[in-house]
């Protein structure tokens, strides 16, 4: 990785000069683009929010509440330009677990709300402690393994809804094992809706017609599901015969919304907030939600046409505020969500007002046409979730991790299997411990796990940072902090010739930092890896060497 210290190319300078204004000026200048983007994102968010809430054991409208709060409130606190705030499929497993372990039903739902409120307060504290840097240091292989496990769990549970049959008891692997037998017991009318909606989600993005690129697949699937629901007359209970078998269908196959749309929502129940189970879920909501949100915000920065960088601390603060308010009103936990944010960028959004318009339009939709929501078949929503789960658990996610390095694939698999066998928190902890173990086996001294050996060498306005022993995810914050203090230096080299091991997280983080420096005319480059052996051909693959020259100084002068 090398970053030039020459001025930015003319095209880049022109793009940066045309940055959209922020605040009220941004609203005046960009409201048409942001309103259109917000409308398209609202169409994507509507079925996803309903489906995520349904799969989480919350009232379906709870997902809409979170999306509305994420748009109307979190917009004014956030530090990200184009992210969309709302409920996420990645938290389904945690929410469902909280509802189940805290009493189930309405009791479990209300107690889960209390844990989300406390988690929101904890996120505010993390933001004030500038914990946004966690997004730079958390191992991506652990996150991808966790999300793959979440995808498997979603598919294992929602596939039965697609087929219109009750799910048996058991964990995700047991549910998947029983799935083939359940196909023989499917409810034909419900299964036709679910499977056709799933086909739309798979095939629509592959079509080459221009209109197919503009139509959100989830919206198209829900629209077809509503049409089939009317065709099969699901609004009225009825029986029908196929092949000598009697099947029942009716309103039970439609989205269970009360005639008074908001009446199913509840307020938090604080009676069990000091219990061990509640504390566990507070930690899980705060940890997993924060990491997933920060990573999403960083990913959207890469999609931003103007390459603006989000203030991760401010974005975490906005998520914390959103969680407190949304859960107080009966909503799901909130994050900066990558799927809707990507749709926002593709739709041409320019400022954070697109997120505001997305929340405002959702509120308008559900307030003016609540009857339409009650015509949505649950099989159609389950199809949207199954499709989402398959994308999270796609074999391509494993292959991407494998290309970075075999050791990353090991961490991925350990996290995924541990999550499926236990729960998310245990899976994440074991994934991190696995990464530590691999680093120790690769020669990382225990004393350098969190404190790298750093020596500064200054020549005029150029500076070399000599890193000794180990540069890994757990001590990258120190390296990053030292670099952030070198504002005077125009040219900085990070020399790893004396490091025994340099991991993927550090190399990827320095590459991202190099691009940020380049925009200001500064140069950050990596040297000293020529004598290291890489674990793959990937530019960010782990680098190791068997013989290391001891650094002359083992201190970390930061100034």
Image (cartoon, rainbow, N blue to C red):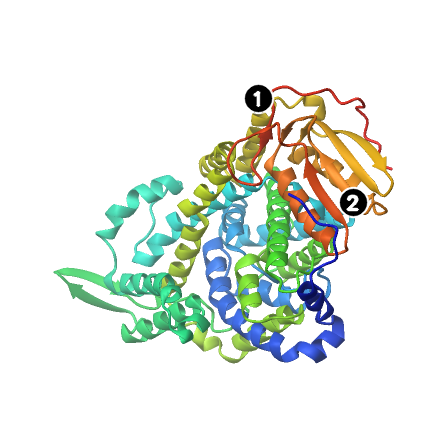
How far is the residue under mark 1 from the one under mark 2?
A: 34 Å
Q: Residues within 10 Å of mark 1 (few under 14, many from 20)?
A: few
Is 190 placed left or right of 322 in the picture?
Answer: left
**Spot occupied by residue 42 in the image (x, y as percentages of width and height):** 54, 71
Residue 221 % position (x, y): 38, 68
Where on the picture, by quarter, is residue 164?
A: bottom left
Asked whether the viewer can see residue 217, the reply is yes
Within 10 Å of disc 2 (Cα), the crowding (few <14, some 14-19, many 20+) is many
**Image vertical order of residue 419 relative to residue 66, above or below:** above
Instruction: Assign a secondary structure to mark 1.
Output: helix
Q: Quadrant of the C terminus?
A: top right
First-in-chain label (1 vs 2): 1
Q: Nearer the viewer, residue 346 or 456?
A: 456
Q: Nearer the viewer, residue 89 or 117?
A: 89
Residue drawn at 40 percent across, 51 percent down: 390
**Which residue shows up at 59% across the image and 46% down it?**
288
Residue at the left extreme of this rendering: 244
Q: Which mark is residue 313?
A: none
Q: Quadrant of residue 545?
A: top right
Which residue is tagged 2? 491
Residue 265 seen: no
Q: Relative to residue 88, is residue 187 drawn left or right?
A: left
* Image position of 225 with respect to 520: above or below: below
| Label pair 1/2, CB-CB below 8 angstroms | no
**Is 278 placed left or right of 40 in the picture?**
right
Residue of label 1: 441
Task: Name the quadrant of the N terminus.
Answer: top right
Who is closer to the viewer here, 78 or 205? 205
Helix or strand or loop: what does disc 2 sit on? strand
Asked if residue 127 is positioned above or below residue 326 in the image, the reply reads above
Point out the frontmost of discs 1 and 2.
2
Q: Position of residue 305 (x, y in %)?
A: 62, 64
């Amino acid at each position: 990785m090398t970053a030039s210290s020459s001025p930015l190319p003319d095209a880049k300078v022109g793009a940066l000069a045309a940055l959209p204004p922020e605040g009220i000026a941004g609203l005046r200048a960009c409201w048409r683009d942001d309103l259109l983007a917000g409308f398209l994102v609202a169409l994507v968010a509507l079925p996803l929010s309903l489906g995520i809430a349904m799969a989480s054991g919350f009232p379906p409208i709870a997902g809409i509440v979170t999306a509305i709060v994420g748009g109307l409130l979190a917009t004014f606190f956030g530090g990200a330009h184009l992210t969309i705030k709302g409920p996420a499929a990645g938290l389904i497993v945690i929410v469902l677990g909280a509802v189940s372990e805290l009493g189930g039903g309405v009791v479990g739902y209300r107690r889960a709300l209390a844990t989300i409120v406390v988690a929101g307060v904890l996120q505010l504290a993390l933001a004030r402690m500038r914990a946004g840097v966690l997004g730079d240091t958390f191992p991506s292989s652990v996150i991808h393994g966790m999300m793959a496990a979440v995808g498997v769990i979603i598919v294992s549970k929602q596939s039965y809804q697609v087929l219109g049959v009750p799910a048996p008891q058991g964990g995700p692997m047991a549910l998947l094992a029983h799935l083939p037998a359940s196909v023989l017991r499917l409810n034909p009318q419900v299964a036709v809706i679910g499977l056709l909606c799933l086909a739309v989600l798979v095939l629509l993005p592959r079509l080459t017609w221009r209109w197919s690129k503009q139509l959100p697949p989830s919206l198209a699937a829900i629209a077809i599901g509503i049409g089939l629901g009317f065709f099969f007359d699901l609004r009225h209970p009825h029986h029908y015969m196929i092949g000598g078998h009697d099947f029942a269908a009716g309103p039970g196959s439609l989205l269970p919304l009360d005639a008074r749309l908001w009446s199913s929502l509840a307020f938090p129940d604080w009676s069990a907030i000091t219990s061990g189970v509640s504390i566990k879920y507070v930690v899980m909501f705060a940890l997993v939600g924060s990491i997933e949100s920060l990573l999403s915000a960083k990913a959207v920065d890469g999609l931003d046409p103007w390459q603006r960088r989000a203030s991760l601390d401010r974005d975490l603060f906005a998520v914390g505020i959103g969680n407190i308010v949304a859960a107080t009103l009966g909503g799901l936990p909130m994050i900066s969500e990558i799927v809707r944010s990507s749709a926002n960028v593709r739709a041409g959004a320019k400022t954070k007002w697109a997120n505001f318009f997305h929340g405002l339009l959702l509120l308008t939709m559900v307030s003016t046409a609540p009857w339409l929501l009650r015509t949505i078949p649950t099989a159609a929503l389950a199809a949207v979730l199954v499709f989402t789960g398959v994308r999270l658990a796609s074999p391509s996610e494993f292959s991407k991790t494998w290309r970075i390095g075999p050791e990353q694939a090991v961490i991925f698999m350990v996290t995924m299997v541990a999550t499926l066998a236990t729960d998310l928190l245990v899976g994440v902890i074991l994934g991190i411990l696995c990464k530590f173990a691999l680093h120790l086996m690769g020669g990382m001294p225990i004393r350098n796990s969190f404190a790298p050996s750093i020596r500064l060498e200054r020549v005029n306005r150029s500076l070399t940072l000599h890193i000794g022993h180990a540069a890994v995810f757990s001590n990258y914050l120190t390296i990053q902090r030292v670099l952030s203090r070198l504002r005077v230096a125009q040219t900085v080299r990070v020399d790893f010739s004396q490091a025994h091991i340099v991991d993927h997280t550090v190399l990827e983080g320095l590459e991202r930092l190099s691009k940020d420096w380049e925009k200001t005319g500064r140069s950050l480059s990596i040297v000293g890896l020529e004598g290291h052996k890489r674990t793959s051909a990937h530019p960010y693959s782990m680098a190791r060497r068997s013989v290391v020259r001891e650094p002359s100084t083992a201190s970390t002068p930061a100034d």
